Structure formats: structure tokens, C-alpha cells
Image (cartoon, rainbow, N blue to C red):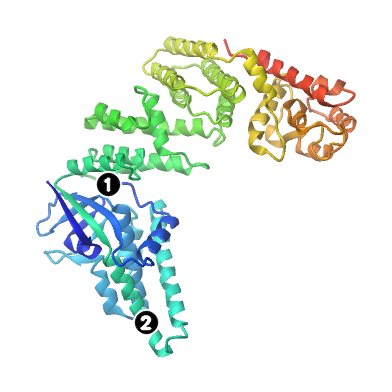
Amino acid sequence: MIEVSTHQTVEQVLQVGFYEIPRFQRPFSWTADNIGDFWTDTVQSESADYFIGAFIVYEADDEQPGRQHNYAVVDGQQRITTITILLAAVRDAFAREASMDLANGLQQYVTRVDRRNQARLILQTEGGFPYLQAHVQSFPPQETANDALKGDERLIQGAYDYFTDQLKSLRTSTLDDSTVPPADRPSRYIEALESIRDRILGLNVILVIVDNEDDAYIIFETLNTRGKDLSLVDLVRNFLLRDLREPEGPGDVPRARFNQIVGKLQEVELPLDPSEFILHSWNSRYQYTSSKRIFRQMKEQFRTRAKKIALLRALEQDVEIYIKVRRPHAGTWPTQMREVQRSLRALRTFNMSQPVPVLLAALRAYEDEVVRMATLKKLFRAIEVFHFTFTAVAGKSSSGGVSTRYAFHARQFLGATREQATGNVADLIQKLRLGLPTRDEIMAGFHRLGYMSTETRAKPLVQYVLEGLYRHQSGGSAEIDFSNMTIEHLASENPRLAVGDLEEAPIAAIGNLILVSESLNNRLSNKSFPQKKQLLAAQQGLFVDQLVLDAEEWGEDEIAERTRAMAELAFDHAWRMPN
């Protein structure tokens, strides 16, 4: 049975029952922009009957007699939480004006007694605990431990502070209103607060009540297909936690485990998308799918509680490895893994996510001692070489077949012996080799590489190429910290003293670029080429290729010749596909 009540007001909704936010729902997530929009739309709007959408709830289990109309919220949890926070802010504004009857009257929409005369919060949620319950819903506020606020608690505090600041600004402007007699200004402020209270309680909603959680679950998914803001991580949280209840024992362990996974992804320097992680983890273990189809496949394959527990464990196992794959600059890598880290950083430079499933699976297999270190390095280098030549240089777009191929080989690591894993790597490398661009395509793409300080978008790729060539030409004999090196133009950018009227294109060309230390870069500045060459040759520990050292002058022909030489060195030697 589905009951739809139209023309409901917020006041009627809050009076009809008690509401809880199910554990599978996402925590409070409205940012300052969302809160500001809500204030503008509901309080400052000129519309007298503003509609804020549908609240979809189902009848919650009620094991305590006398506690009538207990509903679990499926859609509307962000709005009902925000309304509660705003009502509490208005309540506290009444209290600051010593209007305790008005404050206590408004508190009845936050807390009221049930049929057993037991005081209960009208909105009950595990999210925001204990800040929401102690500092917002309680009146007067309760003391809590002085612990750092969690993510959703900080957002709740931010919402309460925003509403409080708006009300204080209203008080200031009302008490400073010269058009109103001073004696009347305090009462005008109280009237303004009452008006805000009435606007919030008078907001229009559609209340949809279903019988059970299963019906609500169907509606939850249907809302997502119709454009509601429910991400894959919201759906997976719902799907897993609704069947992984642990009524016995302290806390909600499955929920905490899932939130810890999400927290790890969002705590890195550049937060990672949890929905993208779930998709990549899935494609490293199960049949390849897309972001649009994954949830349907997940429901079909993971129907039992045991399978859902296994899926949660798989996500826990993968999250740390995934962070290494997607954020290789973070953390400390052991010496033997430096080449692997370098390949991952390169793929990040190319902005490549397609290989992530097989990279994730290979690292997982390495940790399980199924893949040898030498094999791991070879695989990562092969994927790096392929996407450098195919994507970054030749500028080709990978088809869906490449993603499917990576997912296929990711699955081959599952349950494989060491010999089978080695064969899987060799097979994938051979497929990558066959998919490489032609030599002409590679050479043409390399000649398009360039960098000017006024256009920094190409800098990471050019820096990567120069570092790779430097490492190859120097033979690794010099220990160089590339983070302290920068790109120098042999023919100066501005002014172009050394080359007269040389056009911008050859100046930007990679054949005109060289890596030097930051201190040397400052000394080279806009000097002529002979002066630069002298400083470069005298620099201890710096590798400078012979074409530069042998040149008497530096113009368009020399730049073109060096570009050709660098391209040949790159693709005949420095970026050869591993055997």
C-alpha cells in the first residue's frame, strides 16, 4: 500500500509522527551553498506557499507499544534535518530575547512526548551524533565531551551557525530601523521571528507513506533513475547495510566499516570519488560493467547476507591499494617499489583511469605473493608505455574494448598460480604491443609536444618526457631530485635575444627545452645561447646532451634536429615496450 498525502505542511508532517533516518542513508551532507539556497528559497521567498518536494517514508518497526506513527525516511532526510536545525536556531533566538513561551512552543516541533508520556526527538538519526542531539535538538543545550567534530557534525554546526548569523543580522537591522519607534523595535524583531517560524512550518510538502522497507527500497532506486541526487555510493550503502544489521552489541559495526572506507578515500590530499572506487574495485574482480549498470548487476549477484559481507570485505581490502594507485605521490613507497610508483605517477599525468582495475588487481596479487616484483614492474611499465605513446603522444582515444580488456586480465589474477599470473601479464603486454600506434603517428605526435610559461597545461607531460630522456641518457649514474628541476628554454622565451625573429612554435618545441635546477634556471635567465651553453657545460652533476654542447648557434634548424633526435631516442630506446 502506498499512501500519498498532498497539501501537507511541514507543521502537519512534524505532528503526525516520529521520524528516523535509516542507517543505510547517507549522513547529512548539505554544504554552505545548499544551506544558503534553502534560506533564500524558504525564508526570503515572496511565495506564500513554497513547495519543497516530497518526503517518502515507510512504517518503521515499533517494538515499544504506545509509540505511535514511527516512520523511516527514504527521501527527504537532508531537508527534514535542515528544517530541524532552522527551527532550533529560531527557538534559540526567542530564548535570547527572553521569550521563553515562544521558545518552548517551538521546541514542540523538535521534541515532544509520545502516548506513554515519554519525551522523544521527532527526528532521530545516528548521523551528527552527538552534536545534533546535544547542541541543536536539546533545549537548553547539553554538555558533551570536547571532541573534534566529525564531517557531518561540522556541516550541521555550519548550518546552525549560518541560520543563527542570519537571525542576528535581522535583529541588528530591526533594532537599528529608524522608521520604527525605539520602544517598538524589540517587539518587531519578535514578530519577524514568528513570521520566519510560520513560514517554515507552513512550507508545502507531499508526504508519501509506504508499508515496508522493501517498497521504500524500490522507490529509493526509482528516484535515482529519475534524476534525484543519489550516487552509486548511496545506493551501495543502502544495499549492503539494510541486510547487515547487527542488533546485538555496541555500535553499528557494518555502517562504521562502510563509512571508514568512504572516509579513507576522502581524507587523502586530493579526495577520491567513492562511487568511482566501487566501480573500479568491481571491475577488478567481477564481470566488466559500466557505472550505469553496476548496481543492477550487484543486486543480481549479491542477494545473500554472506555475499554482501564478502563484498564489504572486498571493498575494505581494495581501498588502501586503490589509494596507492590513484594517489601515488602520497605516502612512503619502499625502494623496490619506486619504479611501480613512477609508472603510476605517469598514468596520473596522462589522466588515465582505464587501467585502474588491472593495476589494482595486480597489486593485490603481489601482496598475496602471486605476482613477482619483476613481473609487476614489467606490467606497470608496459601500461605506462602504451598510454604514453597511444594517448599522450599520438593523441588517440581508447575504445571501450581497452577497458574491457583491462578488466578481463584483472579477473585472471583471481585464484591464479604464480605461473598463471606471469602468463596473464605476458598476454596483456602482447595485446598492448599490437595496439601501439605506427612509428609515423608517434613521431608526428612527439613533434607537437611543447611548452611555454604562458601556457602551463602541457607542462606536466613535457616535464615527464624530459625526465624520462634525462634518466635514460644519464644512465642513472646521477642521483637527481626532479622535484627541484624546472624547464629551461635554450632559445629564450622573452626577450628572444639569441634567435632574433624566431617564431613562438620552435621556441615552445620540446627540442628547445632542457631540465635544469631552479638556481641554474635563474642564472640562465634571458642570456644568449653561447652564454647559456657555457653555464650548462660548467654545471657539475647536470647531464646535457651532445647536440646542445656541440652547437655553435641555436635557431630553428637546430631545434628541429634536436626534436627529431629526441623522438628517435624516446621510441627506439627510452620507451620501448617491455618483452
Q: Position of residue 265 (x, y in %)?
A: 44, 39
User: Which residue of the protein is positioned furthest toward the left in this rendering?
Assistant: 65
From this view, report whether residue 199 is shown above or below residue 80.
below
**Residue 146 seen in the current view:** no
Q: Nearer the viewer, mark 2 or mark 1?
A: 2
User: What is the crowding at mark 1: few (fewer than 14 residues within 10 Å), some, or many (at least 20)?
Assistant: some
- Picture residue at 74% right of the left edge, 30% below the top: 505
User: What is the crowding at mark 2: few (fewer than 14 residues within 10 Å), some, or many (at least 20)?
Assistant: some
**Residue 16 seen in the current view:** yes
The image's mark for residue 562 is: none
> Camera-side residue: 19 or 387?
387
Where disc 2 sits, the SS reads helix
From this view, report whether residue 357 is shown above or below residue 312.
above
From this view, report whether residue 254 is shown above or below residue 63.
above
**Corner quadrant of residue 480:** top right
| Left-right relation of 523 to 416 | right
Where disc 1 sits, the SS reads loop
The image's mark for residue 188 is: 2
Amino acid type at circle 2 is Arg
Q: Position of residue 208 (x, y in %)?
A: 19, 51
Q: Position of residue 239 (x, y in %)?
A: 27, 37
Amino acid type at circle 1 is Arg
- Picture residue at 28% right of the left edge, 47% below the top: 251
Residue marked by disc 1: 23
**Labels 2 and 1: the sequence-earlier one:** 1
**Corner quadrant of residue 459:** top right
Q: Position of residue 189 (x, y in %)?
A: 38, 79
Q: Quadrant of the C terminus?
A: top right
